[in-house]
Image: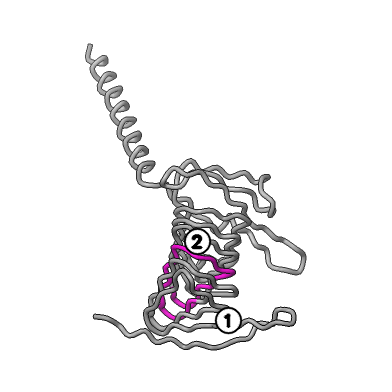
Amino acid sequence: MFRKKILTILTAVILLGASEAWATSIAFYEDGVIQEGDEYVSVGVFNDATVDMSGGIVTSQLTAYDSSLVNISGGSLEAIISTDTSTVNLSGAMQIGGLGVRSSGTVDMFGGNVGLIEAWNYSTVNLHGGTISNYLLAYGDDSLTVNIYGYGFDYDLLAGNYRGGQLTGFWVDDTPFNIDLYYDDTPGGPIIDTYSHITLIPEPTTILLLSLGCLLLRSCLNNQNIYKVERGKL
């Protein structure tokens, strides 16, 4: 059934030297679309609305609230925030300056380019693909989870530009990746140790190969035991 889209549009004035340019901010309370040719200063997504962004520009910030769902497969955004119990899915050729996840928000990243990701308590980040060009930061307790799906993982504590080391490996589609991890232990401030929140999850083929390897090893051990028993009878 077609659901009526309710949009709240707020008009803003941006001063550019002596000239004036008009831009808009928009709030989605029900399902909506952001596409090529659309340009907004800021975007808010509320309730259980689903917003699909395949193009366009958000010059300031898109914020997902409540239990909303935002699917981004194209376009350009300065920043995204996922909060409450919202979910943001990233794929395709989109460009994002910075992404924040907090207060039970969830981000699933399958592609695209993000400058940086900062995740806080009660949030979940699932990384399946794409590029993080600056850093990944995770700060909080055990309620924060960063899951990285792939294979060939390697962690070098001395690499990277943000003191937390660098994680390299391959995504499920065999694309190589490298992620600089953020670390901070400035006196008087909280210790931010991103790597302590990361869970590395081998993709299915790797798990299958490991299982086959265990079965083969078990078979070899069983054969050796049978051989030893038979020799004992001789």
Answer above or below: position of 163 versus 76.
above
Residue 77 in magenta stretch: yes
The residue sitting at 43% across, 71% down in the picture is 70
- Mark 2 or mark 1, earlier in chain: 1
The residue sitting at 51% across, 43% down in the picture is 176
Furthest toward the front, the residue is: 19
Side of 47 relative to 156 (left or right): left
Give the percent coordinates (x, y) of residue 7: 43, 86
Give the percent coordinates (x, y) of residue 134: 63, 56
Callout 1 secondary element: strand
What residue did someone put label 1 on? Answer: 23
Give the percent coordinates (x, y) of residue 211: 33, 39
Furthest toward the right, the residue is: 187
What residue did someone put label 2 on? Answer: 94
The residue sitting at 60% across, 61% down in the picture is 116
Quarter of image, res 6: bottom left
Badge 2 density bin: few <14, some 14–19, many ≥20, Cα 10 Å? many
Tag 2 near tag 1, CB within 8 Å: no
The amino acid type found where label 1 is placed reads Ala
Locate the C terminus by quadrant.
top left
Number of marks in the image? 2
Side of 77 relative to 19 (left or right): left
* Residue numbers of the magenta segment: 64-86
The amino acid type found where label 2 is placed reads Met
Residue 81 in magenta stretch: yes
